[in-house]
Image: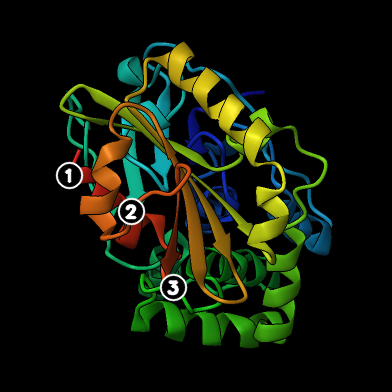
Amino acid sequence: MEKEILIFGHKNPDTDSICSSIVKQRLNESDGKNNTEAVRLGKVNKETQYVLDYLKIEAPRLIEKVEEGQKVIMIDHNEFNQSVDGIEKAKIIGVVDHHRIANFQTSEPLYYTAKPYGCTSTILFKEYKSKGIEIGKEEAVLMASAIISDTLLLKSPTTTKHDKNALKELGEIANIDINQYGMEMLKAGTDLSEFSAEELIELDAKSLDKDGTKFVIAQVNTASIDDVLEREAEIKNAINKKIQQEGLKLFVFVITDILNSNSEIIALGERASIIPKAFGKELENDKALLEGVVSRKKQILPNIDKNI
């Protein structure tokens, strides 16, 4: 039976999106609120599945739309074009997020928690602390996994002291070696061999809109950029098809090397010409290597957003 309030992250969910939704439901239950259910808006990726398998728990159920008036809590996002179909007519009663606020409007007041941390789970960790609620081992693993994922084991420039402190304590509660567990989890997400090019560009894609200019920034993690680029031609074909289908002005596909902390981008669309200005790198065959760049939120999106 569907609960009164649905909790979910963004479409094409990542580890933070799914783990934080589960944690938020459990936090609510520990706080005496038993009317919420964590759900998801897309397929579970391999990195997240590693976490769920480690804990031997099921993924939240999949939903594709919400009905008018459905009460919801948005996790790890706030932009409507990244959310569930029907979100415009849902009753948003809460948001927990660590991204910019854009294209967001409600007709009624709500609980909105936004912190410039590296991960949504760091915000939830603080909420546990402020409420004096004990964190169980499963919740600790879920939150630690989300932080590891979003900060690339604390290597991302989005990492804050709050993420570092939270991850240290969560590792102790979960009784796991953060570096060993974290590297195994991240590596699990780099196996991209079974995905078609169409699936690859959708694995972690964020749809964005700047004053009516629609664009997408998609990202995959890998241990070898060259391995992904062996499929460059089919990836470009899939991107061009997506551009035509959705009327996009730009599609940026980010291939991030988790071992060396670099990213290669493929940029296509009529606004791809902004890339040299945004990053100080010319495109060669629609590609550019961005050294030291790993974060879509802090290093890629802001540069594109102010130039598009």
The residue where tag 1 is placed is 307
The residues bearing labels 1 and 3 have C-alpha atoms spaced at a distance of: 23 Å
Horizontal side of 202 relative to 281 (left or right) equals right
Q: Nearer the viewer, mark 2 or mark 3?
A: 2
Q: Looking at the image, is mark 1 or mark 3 earlier in the sequence?
A: 3
- Where disc 1 sits, the SS reads loop
Residue 106 in percent (x, y) is at 20, 27
Residue 68 in percent (x, y) is at 39, 11
Looking at numbered disc 1 in the image, what kind of residue is underneath it? Asn
Q: Looking at the image, is mark 2 or mark 1 earlier in the sequence?
A: 2
- Looking at the image, residue 247 lies above or below residue 99: above
**Any part of residue 232 in sight:** yes
Looking at numbered disc 2 in the image, what kind of residue is underneath it? Glu
* Residue occupying image coordinates x 73% and y 66%: 187
- Where disc 2 sits, the SS reads loop
Q: Quadrant of residue 246?
A: top left
Looking at the image, which is closer to me, 43 or 298? Answer: 298
Horizontal side of 74 relative to 152 (left or right) equals left
Looking at numbered disc 3 in the image, what kind of residue is underneath it? Ser
**Any part of residue 302 in sight:** no
- Where disc 3 sits, the SS reads loop
Outermost residue on the front side: it is: 284
The numbered disc on residue 282 is 2
The local crowd at label 2, few if under 14, some if 14 to 19, many if 20 or more residues have their Cα within 10 Å, is: some
The residues bearing labels 2 and 3 have C-alpha atoms spaced at a distance of: 24 Å
The residue where tag 3 is placed is 156
* Residue occupying image coordinates x 76% and y 72%: 184
- Looking at the image, residue 74 lies above or below residue 107: below
